[in-house]
Amino acid sequence: MFAARRFTTAIPRVVAGRQAASFHSTRPAFVQVGDAIPDLEVLVENSPGNKVNLAKELQGKGLIVGVPAAFSPACSSTHVPGYISHPKLKDAGKVFVVAVNDPFVMKAWAESLDPEGKSGVRFLGDPSGKFTEALDLTFDSTAIFGNKRSKRYALVAENGKVKEVYVEPDNTGVNVSAANKVLG
């Protein structure tokens, strides 16, 4: 199972002109180059019974595009369509769009963005958010979506490992993880 890495930082305190005991804070570090793709049976495609394990699927070349929500404006108008229509999409290997949504919503979204399925992009739901949590790419979007959601990201994978990481610094923007930046 995938274990998130942690950084520990010692912050010295100065009391009455001398250094006191160090204070340690720990913060999670999101997925990094070289990490294994989480080996989990929690992603679903088209129906709850159709489990997809990306650690097994991505033994060759591939790409995972993480989005905050199916049918949301930026996801539907620019981010995912940018990948679907990109001329270098076929060179990326297997391509998956993952969102903290149920499989029925993801299926309907796939049909709305790629009605004939010609792009080969597969849309996966992460209903429990466990895959996204394993990558340490969740953020609290309760005010907008009602729960924790995925940061917007793209991960280039090869042989079950993360080769390149593109995570939006503001969680939801479409810049760093845009198809033209990831695919060239």
Image (spheres, helix red, strand yellow):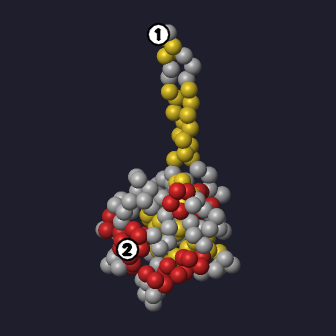
Picture residue at 44% right of the left edge, 56% below the top: 171
Q: Residues within 10 Å of mark 2 (few under 14, many from 20)?
A: few
**Residues under labels 1 and 2: Cα distance?**
57 Å
Q: Which residue is under mark 2? A: 77
Q: Quadrant of the C terminus?
A: bottom left
Q: Is residue 72 above or below residue 18?
A: below
Q: Secondary structure at mark 2?
A: helix
Q: Residue 101, how many percent across, how many down?
A: 57, 70
Q: Nearer the viewer, residue 61 or 120?
A: 120
Picture residue at 50% right of the left edge, 20% below the top: 13
Assess whether mark 2 and mark 1 are in contact (beta carbons under 8 angstroms).
no
Q: Nearer the viewer, residue 95 or 157?
A: 95
Picture residue at 48% right of the left edge, 53% below the top: 32
Q: Amino acid at mark 1?
A: Gly
Q: Residues within 10 Å of mark 1 (few under 14, many from 20)?
A: few
Residue furthest right as drawn: 49
Residue furthest front as drawn: 143
Q: Is residue 100 above or below residue 169?
A: below
Q: Is residue 113 above or below residue 66?
A: below
Q: Secondary structure at mark 1?
A: loop
Q: Report whether 176 appears left or right of 144.
A: left
Picture residue at 38% right of the left edge, 60% below the top: 173
Q: Amino acid at mark 2?
A: Ser
**Which of the numbered marks, if any, corresponds to residue 17?**
1
Q: Quadrant of the N terminus?
A: bottom right
Q: Quadrant of residue 24?
A: top right
- Which callout, 1 or 2, points at the residue further toward the start of the chain? 1
Q: Residue 77, how many percent across, how many down?
A: 37, 73
Is residue 80 visible in the rendered image? The answer is no
